[in-house]
Amino acid sequence: MSNGYTMDRAMAEAARCLLCHEPPCSEGCPSGTDPGKFIRQLRLRNVKGAIATVRRNNVLGGVCGALCPTAELCQKGCTAAGLDRPIDIGGLQRFLVEQGWLMGFQPWQAAPALGIRAAVVGAGPSGLACAAALALDGFSVTVFDKLASPGGIPRHVIPAHRYQGEILPREIDDIAALGVTFVGDHPVET
C-alpha cells in the first residue's frame, strides 16, 4: 500500500518546509486541503492533526495525493523550490491517509441521525464527497450509480496502478462506514 514513505522519511520531507506565513501551496490547492497546514502539523509531529486536516477537507485524500497534478498546482508555488526542490505534497498527503489506516485513526465523526433520507446520483468523486458530507451531517444517504461499483473515473477510467488500486476501495469503505449505502447498476433517468 505504501508509496515509499516511512514515518522517518515523511518527517524529513516535512522538515524541509519553510513554514511560510501565507503558504503559496495552500493557495494553489483546488480542493482546499491546505497543504501548508498538514505539512506544518506533520513537521511538528502532530500526525493525527495532519491526518485530520487531509481527511476532513478531502474524502478521497489518498487518491488525490496520488493523482493530483501537484507540480502544476500546489507545488508550483512552493517556496522550498527556490532552495532545492518543492515539498512532495502529494506523496505526504497520500502517506498521511495510509498512516491513518495503519493507526486505526478516523477523524470523521458523524452527527446524530436526523431521520432524513438523501439520495445522491453518481458515485464518482463529487458524489462520494457529497454523500460523505451529508452522512457527517446526520442524513441517511443512498448513492445510486449506473455502474456496478462506486468510484467514477478513478475506478473505471484511470488505470489502478497510477494510484496503487487499493487506496480507492479503502476510501470508499471509509465513506460506507459513515452509513452510506451504494446501489450500483441503477441508472437514474430524468
Image: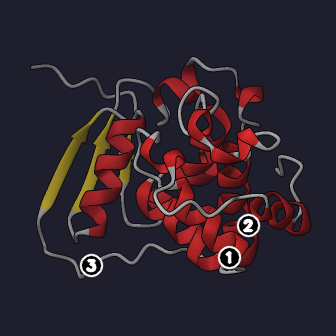
* Depth order, front residue of 58/189: 58
- Residue 10: which numbered mark, if any? none
Instruction: Please state if 82 lies on the left or on the right of 72 as rendered.
Output: right
Q: CA distance from mark 1 to mark 2?
A: 9 Å
Place of residue 94 in the rendered image (x, y in percent of width and height, measured from the top left)? 68, 51
The type of colouring in the image is secondary structure
Instruction: Give SS at disc 1.
Output: helix
- Taking the image as shown, residue 1 lies to the left or right of residue 120, namely right
The residue carrying mark 1 is: 47
**What whole-number distance in Å separates the C-alpha atoms at marks 2 and 3?**
25 Å
190 vs 20, nearest the viewer: 20
Determine whether the residue tagged by mark 2 lies in a helix, strand or loop: helix
Q: Do we see residue 91 in this rendering? A: yes
Question: Which image quadrant for residue 42?
Answer: bottom right
Report how far apart the C-alphas of labels 1 and 3 lie in the structure: 24 Å
Q: Which residue is mark 2?
A: 99
Q: Position of residue 88 (x, y in %)?
A: 74, 45
Hey, what amino acid is under mark 2?
A: Gln
Q: Single out the mark in the foreground, 1 or 2.
A: 1
> Which element carries disc 3, helix, strand or loop?
loop
Badge 1 amino acid: Val
Q: Position of residue 173 (x, y in %)?
A: 54, 56
Contact (Cβ within 8 Å) of mark 1 with mark 2: yes
Other-residue count near label 1 (Cα within 10 Å), few / some / many at <14 / 14–19 / ≥20: many
Circles 2 and 3: CB atoms closer than 8 Å = no
Q: Residue at x 69, y 79 (%)?
A: 44
Image vertical order of residue 166 relative to residue 98, above or below: above
User: To which quarter of the image does residue 39 belong?
Assistant: bottom right
* Residue drawn 65% across the image and 80% down it: 46
Q: Write down the residue under mark 3.
A: 111
